[in-house]
Image (spheres, rainbow, N blue to C red):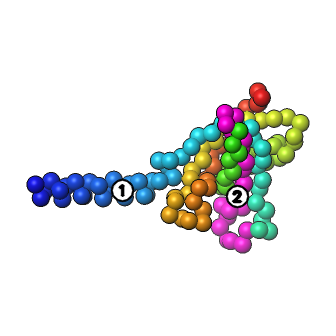
């Protein structure tokens, strides 16, 4: 009986460790909605030598089903193609994106998203 309890405790520990390590991937959301804004974070606001931050974007998408507006940060360079296009408000585009939540134990960022991945963009049929 004691061996069984130890085995269960070990398995629970590993399961808990996996959830902690892969939390953003386990709880990622894929949303489809109107592409409201894609803004590049300007080089003047970046005080780091990390070159990947030169391609940092802030994204806002209004989900079609619920009307909720989701915002996220991203370093995915695909958003760069839509930065200027989304600024033109004469045409409406819809994006399908995967958003990864911050872990709830990061209290300052809990409930927000990062590393938005652009999956597809199409004309919106509103």
Report the mark closest to the observer, 2 or 1.
1
When asked about the image quadrant of residue 35, the answer is top right
Residue 82: image quadrant is top right
Identify the mark at residue 16; answer none if there is no mark. 1
Residue 51 figure quarter:
bottom right
Regarding residue 120, the answer to whether it shows in the image is no
Query: In percent of the image, x 69 and y 42: which residue is there?
Result: 68
Q: Nearer the viewer, residue 104 or 18?
A: 104
Helix, strand or loop at mark 2: loop
Q: Residue at x 51, y 52 (%)?
A: 24
Q: In which quadrant will I find the N terminus?
A: bottom left
Q: Nearer the viewer, residue 122 or 33?
A: 33
Percent of width and height locating residue 119: 63, 39
**Residue 56 lies in the magenta stretch:** yes
Q: CA distance from mark 2 to mark 1?
A: 32 Å
- Mark 2 and mark 1 lie on one chain; the one further toward the N terminus is 1
Q: Which SS class for mark 1?
A: helix
Residue drawn at 67 percent across, 55 percent down: 73
Q: Position of residue 95 (x, y in %)?
A: 70, 38
Residue 25 at x, y = what percent? Answer: 49, 49
Q: Nearer the viewer, residue 78 or 105?
A: 105
* Residue 85 place in picture, x, y as percent: 82, 42
Q: Is residue 87 magenta?
A: no
Question: For the magenta stretch, what is the residue range?
Answer: 46-66
Q: Which residue is mark 2?
A: 56
The C terminus, quarter of image: top right
Q: Which mark is residue 46?
A: none
Q: Label 2 crowding class (10 Å Cα cut-off): few <14, some 14-19, many 20+?
A: many
């Amino acid at each position: 009986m004691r061996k069984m309890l130890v085995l269960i405790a070990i398995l629970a520990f590993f399961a808990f460790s996996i959830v902690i390590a892969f939390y953003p991937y386990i709880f990622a959301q894929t949303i489809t909605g109107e592409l409201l804004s894609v803004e590049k974070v300007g080089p003047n606001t970046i005080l780091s030598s990390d070159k990947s931050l030169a391609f940092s974007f802030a994204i806002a998408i209004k989900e079609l089903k619920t009307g909720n507006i989701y915002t996220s940060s991203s370093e995915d360079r695909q958003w760069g193609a839509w930065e200027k296009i989304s600024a033109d408000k004469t045409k409406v585009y819809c994006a399908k994106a995967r958003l990864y939540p911050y872990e709830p134990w990061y209290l300052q960022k809990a409930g927000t998203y990062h590393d938005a991945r652009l999956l597809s963009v199409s004309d919106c049929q509103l």
